Amino acid sequence: MEYTTLGRTGLRVSTAGLGCGGHSRLGQSYGHSFEQSVAVVRAAIDAGVNFIDTAAAYRTEEIVGAAVKTGRDSVVISSKLGVVRPGTSPLGEDYLTGDDYVAMAEQNLVRLGTDHIDIFHLHGVMPGQYAYCREELVPALIRLREQGKIRYFGLTERFIHDPQHRMLQMALRDDCWDVVMTGFNMINPSARHRVLKETLEQNIGTLIMFAVRRALGSVEGTAEVVAELADRGEIDASVLDPQNPLGFLLDPGDATSLIEAAYRFCRHEVGADVVLTGTGSVAHLAENLSALSRPPLPSETLARLDRHFGMVDSVSGN
């Protein structure tokens, strides 16, 4: 496992982070037991992963808390809380007040079984919600930090609805964020210039989500998304195999699988500190961590990806 410094936080973190949400939610989405999901977290820690990302919305905080109960100080816990009232549209404006936010964040602590959260994020903020967050909820984060309940401030985008990173581009004009989480992958690398360039300049820690998801998890998923992009005139699909558009990634000397290539693409991007990987299987976790430990894709392969998808910013890959 390799480690890096997470921007201005100074925290030493594994470059591979365990994501406890996504489609799997540590296997909870597929009917796995609490104990099976705890085993996945512990396997990640045993493999050297010390960055664990969860959230109130994932309903996996109790699992993380159980897994790190005897080794809390050896891990960096990242958790999150949405900015609107539970049960309302996450895209709407039925916002939590600052007092609400403080009270609900304290429940994150209870679920995690800890007295502090290392990085606490405003979760899935839309562009139209950001001004409210800055004026009302950042002071709430400051109160939580002053009380010793959180250490650093984070902010995550809602990449599925904001694949152009409009919210983060606004947020990066304010000097209050220690860490941000952005979507980035082979078919939408737009964060390279719109987010990562700025986080590097400002020494803001950067977490990468959506490295794989559905579009890069299978040949069929990739073909479907590529066809959509071609229909909209966003890429020239005539130079790609319609049945296996990214098959060239598996040329001798490149990657052994599409998923491996996807993880390596993100892992070695300049400005990407932690790449999140989520699963409910210990065996699958080992495969993902192995992919993240491999060297960069060949420069010719990266150049070809850039020619095909370098200007795409309309899809998340979910």
Image: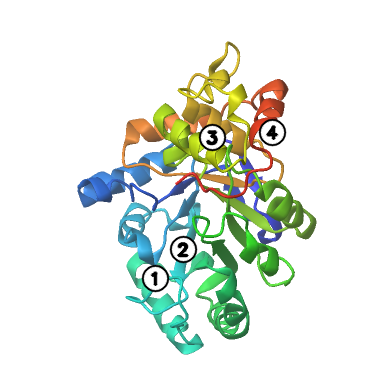
Contact, CB < 8 Å: mark 1 with mark 2?
yes
Q: CA distance from mark 1 to mark 2?
A: 8 Å
Q: CA distance from mark 2 to mark 4?
A: 33 Å
Q: Which residue is mark 2?
A: 79
Q: Amino acid at mark 2?
A: Ser
Q: Which residue is mark 1?
A: 108
Q: CA distance from mark 4 to mark 1?
A: 40 Å
**Mark 3 surroundings within 10 Å by alpha-carbon count, few (fewer than 14), some (14 through 19), many (20 or more):** many
Q: Of the numbered discs in the image, which one, if any, rests on residue 306?
A: 4
**Residue at horizontal 56 percent and vertical 78 percent from the top:** 141
Q: Nearer the viewer, residue 216 or 225?
A: 225
Q: Which residue is mark 3?
A: 263
Mark before the other along the chain sequence, 2 or 4:
2
Which residue is farthest top? 252
Mark before the other along the chain sequence, 3 or 4:
3
Q: Amino acid at mark 4?
A: Asp
**Residue at horizontal 41 percent and vertical 83 percent from the top:** 103
Q: CA distance from mark 3 to mark 2?
A: 22 Å
Q: Amino acid at mark 3?
A: Tyr
Foreground label between 3 and 2: 3
Q: CA distance from mark 3 to mark 4?
A: 16 Å
**Mark 1 surroundings within 10 Å by alpha-carbon count, few (fewer than 14), some (14 through 19), many (20 or more):** many
Q: Amino acid at mark 1?
A: Asn
Residue 286 sits above or below residue 113 on the image: above
Mark before the other along the chain sequence, 1 or 3:
1
Question: Is 57 on the left-hand or right-hand side of 202?
Answer: left
Question: Is 10 on the left-hand or right-hand side of 251?
Answer: right
